[in-house]
Image: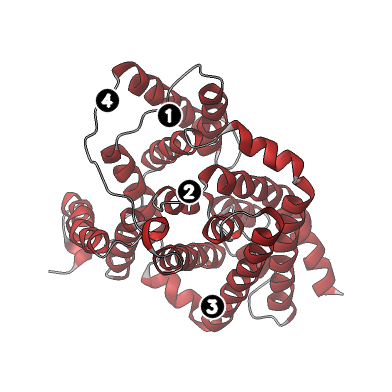
Amino acid sequence: MSLPTLPLWLRWLLLPIVSVPLTAGLIWIQLPAALLLGPMVSGILLALGGVGLKMPRITFLMAQSVLGCMIAGSVRPEILVTVAEDWPIFLGIVLSTILLSGALGWVIARNHILPGTTGVWGTSAGAASAMVVMAEAFGADARLVAFMQYTRVLFVAFAAALLAHFLLAGEAGAAAPIVWFPPIQPLAFAETLALAAAGVAAGRLIPVPAAGLLLPMIGGAVLSATGLMTIQLPQWLLAASYAVLAWSVGLGFTRAVLMHALKALPTILVSIAVLIGFCAGLAWVLTQLTGIDLLSAYLATSPGGLDTVAIIAASSRGVDIGFVMALQTMRFFLVVLLGPPLARFVARQVRE
């Protein structure tokens, strides 16, 4: 019996059945972000096998909002001071990444490797889900854009996890020990769930990309920093949220999409490698200018996605997650803001 012919409930059940042993193996070898990578690989394998599932939007928003709460609990006021003092450095790094991704998109469009402005949207450094939505609105091939964006997310996730595992010896590079059922403060946990629920509502009602992530992240950071609330998220809830986000990426790698993108696959992989390598170089520059550790700098400059980087940062000891998310969030907003005019500019240049 093939996967597509199985009952729907059984196909959904296959996700945890495949993910749990794979994730356990990655945890055993102490690979950072095992709770992300295990479900992501499982989703890819099942999607290529024809499982035919797509994560419901409400489930995705719930997981995204929990992640926003997790990030909020990691942001410290002194990080904002650092960003304010060194804003030219941060802005320069973000803009240089956006310009390189635009140049890669121009090369792809100029050589007619992909149709129209598809290459520009596909090479955009970050805001993957937002880029897919905006690309479709501007007439690009949304399937190819999604494939390029989520292939980059996949490569960034594995590259960052491997770097965390091998770059730093000992405590800083090892996966944090997992306490699945820590003691819970009922009031703090209830407040955190209320914040996450507000994020879900924002994701459904506010027409802003990743509103479900950004509202609890920003609002929670303010409330936590001012002492108005304590964010508490048990590991079992985080693990479930990581799995949902990972499955939503993995399930997008269907055979139909892969066949559609096969002709351009070498170019797509080269553009991803160039972008990741360039961001690694920027990470080294950032360490020299600010004194931040290399792993935190790499995660801060890596080309998305925001949620993937947050999970890897939270899963690796020694990483300054507040610093990482400050730079990642700045890039997210600038990518969403500059994406449409950059695509139009490249389209005009190609026509000329």
Label total for image:
4
Q: Are marks 1 and 2 in contact (CB under 8 Å)?
A: no
For marks 3 and 4, give the one nearer the viewer. 4
For marks 1 and 2, give the one nearer the viewer. 2
Mark before the other along the chain sequence, 1 or 4: 4
Q: Which residue is mark 4?
A: 184
Res. 65 image quadrant: top left
Q: Residue 30 at what x, y percent from top left? A: 29, 61
Q: CA distance from mark 3 to mark 2?
A: 23 Å
Name above or below for residue 68 compared with residue 130.
above
Label 2 neighbour load within 10 Å: few <14, some 14-19, many 20+? many
Scheme of image coloration: secondary structure
Instruction: Tell me which amino acid carries mark 3.
Output: Leu
Residue at the far left in the pictured view: 1
Residue 196's disc is: 1
Instruction: Tell me which amino acid carries mark 2.
Output: Ala
Q: Which residue is mark 3?
A: 269
User: Can residue 262 be seen from the camera position used here?
Assistant: yes
Mark before the other along the chain sequence, 4 or 2: 4
